[in-house]
Image: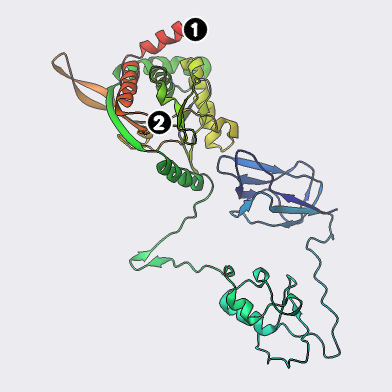
Amino acid sequence: MVTEFKLPDLGEGITEGEVRKWLVKEGDSVKRDQSLAEVETDKAVVEMPSPAEGKILKIHHPEGGVVKVGEVLVTIGSEGEITEAPEVRKPSVSVVGELPEAPEVMPPAAPTIKQIPAVSEQSVLALPAVRQLASELGVDLASVKGTGPDGRVTVDDVRRSKALPKERPRIVPKFDVYGYVERRPIRGVRRTTAKRMVESLAKAAQVTAMDVIDVTELMALREREKVALKESKGIHLTYMPFIIKAVVEALMETPVMNSSYDEESEEVVIKKYYNVGFAVATEDGLLVPVVKGADQKSIVELAQEVERLTELSNSRKVDLGDLKGGTFTITNYGVFGGTYGTPIINYPEVAILGTGKIADAAVVINGEIKVRKVMHLSLSFDHRVMDGADAAKFLNSLKRYLEDPELLLISMESSS
């Protein structure tokens, strides 16, 4: 029995995937549920299990190929089974034989003699002259409605056709007028990111507010705790758990930041839960895993969750559910040396926080100039939903908690 394994509906609105790697080759014997290929969606890399036991008769898409949901990935069966549809049987002809498929132009037939139609692979009735014209014009005969006898496609049908031209090999030059160039296809995560960034900019009135904060005390607190936490729980403590905790406190004080905009009803939907996403730069592009219920987690629990989600994202094994449900996003370009930015909102959220690198700066304290550790913040927000005053209030709250991180510990005790 031949089994055509089609790319299944993976949910989450995914319509296609890219074959990242084949784990089998044609001729291999496979067992049921054995992994056949790694398929990369816009979210994660998913292994495709075999639906049946048998031999790989045909692989329908190469590595790097894009497969739509419902298209055949691989054909499985017993050795010797037919993997292609049987050829269409050509009609019987007179003693003169069949009309040839050659591209040469045939002389027009006498009006009293009925021509025997040539049959293409798609069973399209057309004379060789018509096929030649269609080839020259790049017309797909299968998409042309024939108006001749028995539905035969005529020369006029081809000329009137508005069908798209046949796909031809694209010749891509390796250089332009200035020198050699390299082309890299946009696939997987990068392709989805490109689409969503354009969508976000098109659907939201985005403005960026900026501020600088003194994180000297935060840096000292992290230095004191990271060694103990590593030894006791094996956790690498970064600044992200502290930032997430401070963001949650600031969101509670500025609820409009933790919302979305319902365009149909023209209502602001304020979320009463706090799911904070953070951008992870993987080799394939940015992923944004989400820490669910961030308001209910301690700094240690946040550190564990951040580390877990980061590792899964980098290995592309993160679950699709971990990439959904965010209410606010943080992107830390400071880890790459960036200072300021204008981050694009992770639509349909209404705000995103960008955090820059921590650097030395001269700060005036009580009339004295001192060297302190500072971090630059960039907050992009949807001006349809809130005003600059809301953004300033949020940044001021964030500044208060990050400049005095002991407040985060106090807020945790009061909420427990």
The residue sitting at 27% across, 27% down in the picture is 211
For the residue pair 348 and 414, the one nearer the viewer reads as 348
Looking at the image, residue 205 lies above or below residue 406: below
Count residues near mark 1 (Cα–Cα under 10 Å), then give few for <14, some for 14-19, many for 20+.
few
Where does residue 260 sit, x and y in percent of width and height? 46, 30
Q: Nearer the viewer, mark 2 or mark 1?
A: 2
Where does residue 54 sit, x and y in percent of width and height? 82, 50
Where does residue 360 sit, x and y in percent of width and height? 25, 26
Residue type at numbered disc 2: Ala
Q: Quadrant of residue 123?
A: bottom right
| Residue behind mark 1 | 416
For the residue pair 170 and 348, the one nearer the viewer reads as 348
Q: Is residue 121 left or right of residue 262?
A: right
| Residue behind mark 2 | 351
User: How many dots with numbers?
Assistant: 2
Q: SS class of the residue under badge 1? A: loop
Ranked by sequence position, the earlier of labels 2 and 1 is 2
The residue sitting at 36% across, 37% down in the picture is 206
Q: Quadrant of residue 349?
A: top left
Looking at the image, residue 11 lies above or below residue 96: above
For the residue pair 412 and 395, the one nearer the viewer reads as 395
The Cα–Cα distance between marks 2 and 1, rounded to whole angstroms, is 28 Å
The residue sitting at 37% across, 35% down in the picture is 333
Residue type at numbered disc 1: Ser
Residue furthest to the left = 367
